[in-house]
Amino acid sequence: MSENEEGGILPIKPVKLSDTIAQHIQQMILEGVLRPGERLLSERDLSVKLSVSRPSLREGLDKLIAFGLLTTNAQGATYVSEEIGKSLRDPLLVLMDDPAARSDLMELRAVVEASAAGYAAERASDIDRERLQDHFEAMMDAHERDSIDDIARSDAEFHFAIYEASHNIMMLHLMRSLESVLRSSVYLNRQSLYKHRADPGSQIVEHRLILEAILAGDADRARAAAQAHMASAIRTQQEIHESEKRLELSIRRLSRSDLIASRKRRETGPAK
């Protein structure tokens, strides 16, 4: 109990229920449980879920709207703001047209993936481990069906599950802010890698090594497996880029006739 300067006991100010509600939902956004663009339940259903009154809930939601964490539409539906992380994400979306920027993104992923895998091995809960196994099994199923779209999608889900299992809030929000860039990167790279590799199944082996290390709680092995996986992906991406450059050069050579005037026989005669 605190005292004032005169030695008297300071009164305890009760915490408003609306503040508690706002803090609870804000924490869920901070931890990545509620993601940008997701729609919340209606006020009636949400008040039942949280066991609070609708007026207190509405006041708590209004605080988060004022902070810019939530938004509402004309129908009164409440969403997690899509502006979260947008200032970082949007310029990078433009840069992704540059092959060099895509290579830089892969190098960033190599650093983050290794750290995330190590932290996941140390911190993953039973629920995290179960989700990782589910995503890996989905990847295996897609691989057996030879569905490139599903393979790429499940690959992205597996990597985002590792970020979540790392339980590093700053890392998670950095990757969440880049989510659309990363999902596109993983999706497109996975399609290219699958088509380009002589042994597409090697990707499954690399993911299994990461998963097994995390499940075993071996942080060093998890980091090493993630580093090896990303190094392999970067090498293959470089091979694809070089192949595309050679193809573009060949196409330019074929199209040179569209830019060069047709040859005419040089006129002969006395020089002037």
Image (cartoon, helix red, strand yellow):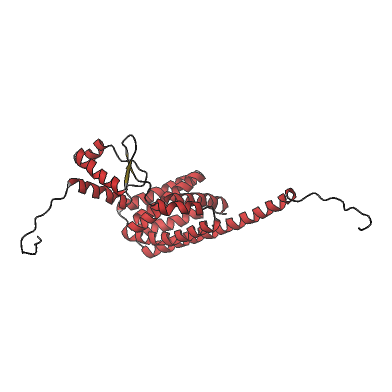
In depth, the one of 159 and 1 nearer the eye is 1
Asked if 16 appears above or below 7 in the picture, the reply is above
Q: Is residue 136 something that shows in the picture?
A: no
Residue in view at x 90 percent, y 52 percent: 267
As drawn, the residue found furthest toward the top would be 75
Residue in view at x 26 percent, y 43 percent: 62
* Location of residue 171 in the rendering, given as x and y in whole percent from the top left corner: 37, 58
- Residue 242: quadrant of the picture: bottom right
In depth, the one of 73 and 32 nearer the eye is 73
The quarter in which the N terminus is drawn is: bottom left
- Residue 271: quadrant of the picture: bottom right
Asked if 234 appears above or below 142 in the picture, the reply is below
* Location of residue 232 in the rendering, given as x and y in whole percent from the top left corner: 51, 60
As drawn, the residue found furthest toward the front would be 272
As drawn, the residue found furthest toward the right would be 270
Asked if 256 appears above or below 220 in the picture, the reply is above
Q: Is residue 250 something that shows in the picture?
A: yes
* Location of residue 2 in the rendering, given as x and y in whole percent from the top left corner: 10, 61
State the count of labels: 0
The quarter in which the C terminus is drawn is: bottom right
* Location of residue 211 in the rendering, given as x and y in whole percent from the top left corner: 40, 56
Residue in view at x 40 percent, y 51 percent: 86
Residue in view at x 10 percent, y 54 percent: 12
